[in-house]
Amino acid sequence: MLKQLGFTLLEALITILILIILGSISLPGFKNMIEKHRNELTMRKMLTAIEFAKSSAITRSTLVTICRSNDGLQCSGEWRDGVIVFSDENGNREIDDDDFLIQYFRFDGFEGEIMWRAFQNRQYLQITKLGFTRYQNGNFTFCPKEVNPALANQLIINRTARVRIAGDTNGDGIKEDSRGRPIRC
């Protein structure tokens, strides 16, 4: 009696077919998980930049500006490119002779949009030497490339420059803004 070693062609094809089906079922969930992780990483970098700016303003006893920057040298580009934190003695949102660049935060790998909404719709954030915003309560909204409300997120900033991450209070999988409404992109 011969002992059979290996698989028959039919068994191998069935095994490959099962693997393809399982892979196609899990791929969309895996893709969402990766995109959610990238969004969270970018959001945490932005949170770090804001906290760093607040700390710098207090310890250096000066006005500090956070603005979007695509080159790390001046205010330009989109929020998704990155942000610079710099001392801004005269508050003009430009790095002049009396000012200096404190830190550049680059957001590599983020696919989507970051929007800053604040009073008077200024596209920068300033922190006073006391650690307060300069009348700029607002939020940074993170919207994924593919419009999926479950992947949207938000940083909410109050007058004292305290930052909190939006939460999902009703358990529907979509985070709510400061007024309790679902985040919209």
Image (cartoon, helix red, strand yellow):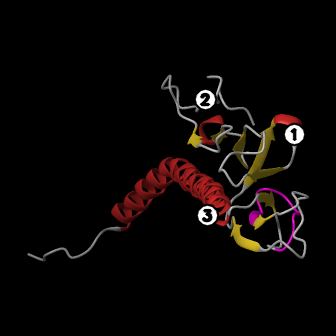
Q: What's the residue at 90%, 72% (across, down)?
A: 96
Pointers 1 and 3 in contact (C-beta within 8 Å): no
Q: For the residue carrying disc 3, how many other residues have a C-alpha within 10 Å: few (<14), some (14-19), or many (20+)?
A: few
User: Which one is nearer the viewer's eye here, 98 or 170?
Assistant: 98
Q: What is the spatial separation of the Cα atoms under label 2 and label 3, in whole angstroms?
A: 34 Å
- Name the secondary structure under disc 1: helix
Task: Tell whether position 27 is magenta.
Answer: no
Give the residues drawn in magenta, as a range: 73-85
Q: Which mark is residue 59?
A: 3
Dot 2 or dot 3: first in sequence order is 3
Q: Amino acid at mark 2?
A: Glu
Where residue 158 appears, as percent x and y from the top left, is 66, 37
Of badges 1 and 3, nearer the viewer stands 3
Residue under the point 71% across and 72% down: 102
Front residue (pair 92, 157): 92
Q: Residues at badges 2 and 3 in contact (C-beta under 8 Å)?
A: no
Q: Position of residue 75 (x, y in %)?
A: 87, 63
Front one among 82 and 98: 98
Total number of numbered labels?
A: 3
Q: Secondary structure at mark 3?
A: helix
Q: Quadrant of the C terminus?
A: top right
Query: Which element is circle 2 on?
Result: loop
Q: In the orientation shown, which residue stands out farthest toward the left?
A: 1
> Which residue occupies 87% across, 45% down?
122
Q: Which residue is mark 2?
A: 176
Residue drawn where x is 73% and y is 50% of the image? 145
Q: Is 74 drawn above or below residue 23 in the view shown?
A: below
User: Which corner quadrant holds the N terminus?
Assistant: bottom left
Q: CA distance from mark 1 to mark 3?
A: 28 Å
The dominant secondary structure in magenta is: loop
Number of other residues with Cα within 10 Å of mark 1, as a class: few under 14, some 14 to 19, many 20 or more? few
Give left or right: position of 14 versus 93: left
